[in-house]
Amino acid sequence: MPTPKLPEKRWSIDLEKQIQEDHYADAELYSRRYSFKPNSGKEIFVIDTPPPYPSGTWHIGAVAQYSMIDVIARSQRLLGKEVYFPWGVDRNGINIEFTVEKNTKRKMKTYDREEFLQLCEQTIEEFTNAMRTTARRVGLSCDFDREYLTDSPNYRSVTQSIFVDLFKQGKIVEDLRPNIYDPVEGTTIADAEVERTTRMTKLVDVRWTCEDGTDVIISTTRPELICACGVVMVHPEDTRYEHLIGKRISLPIPVEHRDSSVVIQTHPSVKSEFGSGVLMVCSFGDQNDVAVFRELGLQPFQAINLDGKMTDIAGPFADMSVLDARKEVISWLEANNRLHNIEDREQEIPISERGKNPVEIILLKEWYVKQTDMQDVMKNHIEEIEFHPPRNRQFLLDWMENITIDWPISRRRWYHTEIPVWYADNGQKIILPPSGTYVQPWKEEPPVGSEVIDRETREFLGTYDEMKSLLTDIVGEEKVFDTWMDSSNSNLFTSGYLNEPDVFEKAFPTALRPQGKEIVRTWLYYTLLKSSLLLDQPGFKHVWIDGLGMDPWGRKMSKSLGNGIDADSVLECGAGGRTATWKIKGPDSQVTLNANKIGSECFRLWKACDAQVGDDFQINPEDIEKKYYGVLTKLFNVSRFASQFEISTSLDEVPEQLEIEDEWILSEFQHVLTKVSKAWNELDIYTATQTLKGFGTGILPSHYLEMVKSRLYDDDAIAAWTIHRIVRDFMTLFSPICPFFAHHISLVLYGQSAVECDSIPQLQVKSFIEDPTRAAKLRALSNQIQEFNGMVWNAKKESGLSLNQPIQSIFIPNELAAFTSTLVRMHNLE
RNA sequence: GGGUCUGUGGUCUAGGGGUUUAUGACGUCGCCCUUACAAGGCGAAGAUCGAGGGUUCAAUUCCCUCCGGACCCA
């Protein structure tokens, strides 16, 4: 056997790692291949990569999704687009604050703000580095030179400038409204950040007394909120209480600074069958209370302050924490003979997603992005976006149906983008910084170029530089933005908004938003809201929504369930001969999974092949290896086999004297080319990969190679040309899926890396051009060829013959007459 | 309680009114060290497409009900 150019006997993880290291080592070469060149003249394709949030380990499901985004980036380059595949890291937020608190065992608010921010930055930087390494390990072809961090001054200045623009346009407002508030973490949170959990609580039946002396029993799980009661309600058709409607009823506990009685009214939302059928409405026990207060125009009471303690109106219970007050109120009720009954009951309560603390609804002056009046506009914009898969559009529309309140964007935390506002003259005036500057109002003066405007009317009053001496009590805002306020700019930022206006012109709407379906209601929704508000446009051309990574029991992988798999363990599995073991906790048992070798190429191939986009996918490293490592082995060996034969004529020129089997396989391959490029165009990774895999592990090696083996050994230049041309172009098409693999083979065999191709290979076979039906006719024979070969193999097996032994009495069907000599040689027919 | 999605050989998965005797892979079983590949090759077995109704000449595919799963919301 002549020496193959590929010396290794098989694909290995160590080889993969070597190629990968080389791939990222040469910065200039890397940049030539993958960096964004906005002036190349090609069609710009910006991918709004989800900037990952660094939190220690990177989750396997997320890494799987990123690798598919990379497949899209690479396939779009192959289609000739100028791709910007950005690498961003989302570093703002409460998670890193929690991590620092946990590491130092000290609460954030006991620190000096500056000192705490530094601690956060250090910690997040360590996590970020781990992530940068994993990103390369899985083969991401991001433009790492342009890395953006959402906590960098540049990124934050964009967030702040957008705020200033929207504020001036009246699209951001300040208001005293009921807010969902986490008293333990001391911050407001958005609807989207609320979770539910089940807890045992006490359902207390309290005896209230009406002005006519009637006793009424009211059940509640929140007796401490009686002091904030605004109205008592019964159902309009509940005949039991008809006589009480319109009368006043005394609060059963002492209160201060307010009326000690409220009126009894009717309301259809009251459930007559619950408890006694009488409901007290407090500001604010839940969202229904908020709705009732708004509907009836009642003045809300502030019962709980920012520290989670009862306010003055609670009278004797003022200054107690909510839980203490609840206990004390119950004791008081009991002591004063107002407690009718008490029982334990399971109840669903809202808690904060990040802190897991029960949340309260309290009145706060906060900043809001107006969104309730934008829904129709947004729906029109969303119509223009192509969703992959189309059904996932529904997730977004469903969420939008549920939006009833504006988006509260201010938070009382620290490691976030600051709200860029100063107040002056007793809060009557507002100072806003100029566009493009990052400001930290809690510690800085307003910068040169700031504007002064009226807080209520938003009228421009003058420049800060002129008015400086006239303004009194300038106070910087201490609050910060919700992190979604930052991350919902990612597509604007990466497309060049504010920073590169000429690029933005060509790059917006952003070509693609790829993301997981679990953040449709946050990231996707808020991003689209921003583009509708700022630019009156849809934010994207395509939205690609993938499913979730599931454990072997079909449950979402998550830290809390303990069923997650660390990405690095899969990517490094097999390196240096080390195998890996995973123990995964199930609902009532634990499984142990083992694998010998996976690596990035096998991992990517698995994700590309195993399920359609949008479906949840089961992650089982054992299966990944079993199902897909063999595919790589096969393709590697086909290439290795080919690599022992010389190429005597240019691979770009199709020779004219093709044998019939060469023409036949080229007709099949041409079909593959067409199908795969169509799939790449449609962001259809699954079809592209399946097509390539089917061809490369099936018909090509099993049928074509077997047919031409003897010709190859006889140094037939045409057969060698055909197999090389197919291997070369195959690697080009395959490079988006397994870039290191395809790069290595193409470079060693053809001196040219598949990852650098920026067009789909074109196959110009003369006989196909002369007779347009010829390719299809040949391809129509494929089934018969495969059947015939199978039949011969079977016949040999049944006669106990090995495959290279001669066999008699086999007749070639008429349709395959043209292949007679080939088939006779292949099977040694007599 | 409501919404959305989903249920295809042992496992994962494709397809989506007739082209279907349902795709592919893993696993299983049998044969083969045939000069690319045993970390292989070839072949075989294995599914009344969750259950029940309906629409239709025709349903795995459309509709309804039920059962199971996932996600989201109240």
Image: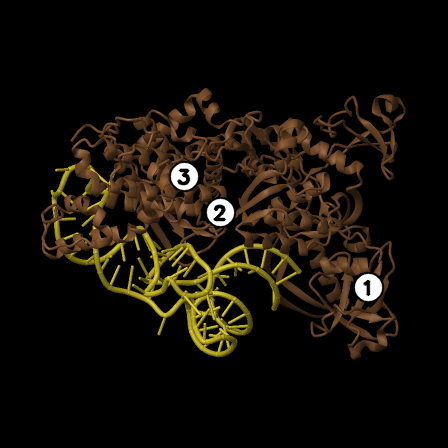
Chain colours: A brown, B yellow
Q: Position of residue A755 (x, y in %)?
A: 41, 30
What is the quadrant of the N terminus of chain A in the image?
Answer: top left
Answer left or right for A125 relative to A467: left
Looking at the rendered structure, the kind of residue marked 1 is Val
Looking at the rendered structure, the kind of residue marked 2 is Lys
Answer left or right for A615 relative to A505: left
Looking at the rendered structure, the kind of residue marked 3 is Ile
In the image, residue B22 above or below residue A484: below
Is residue A630 among the parts visible in the rendering?
no
Circles 2 and 1 on the same subunit: yes
Q: CA distance from mark 3 to mark 2?
A: 29 Å
Q: Position of residue B49 (x, y in %)?
A: 41, 66
Whether the residues at callouts 3 and 2 have beta carbons within 8 Å, the answer is: no
The residue that disc 1 covers is: A231
If you read the primary sequence from the N terminus, does the residue marked by circle 3 or circle 2 appear first? 2
Whether the residues at callouts 3 and 1 have beta carbons within 8 Å, the answer is: no
Q: Which numbered disc, 3 or 1, marks the residue closer to the eye?
A: 3
Q: Residues within 10 Å of mark 2 (few under 14, many from 20)?
A: few
The residue that disc 3 covers is: A737
- Name the subunit of mark 2: A
Whether the residues at callouts 2 and 1 have beta carbons within 8 Å, the answer is: no
The residue that disc 2 covers is: A559
Q: Nearer the viewer, residue A356 or A370?
A: A370
Answer left or right for A226 relative to A343: right
**Residue in view at x 78 percent, y 53 percent:** A303
Q: State the SS at label 3.
A: loop
Q: CA distance from mark 2 to mark 1?
A: 44 Å
Circles 3 and 1 on the same subunit: yes
- Report how many numbered discs are placed on residues in the image: 3
In the image, residue A15 above or below residue A337: above
- Name the subunit of mark 3: A
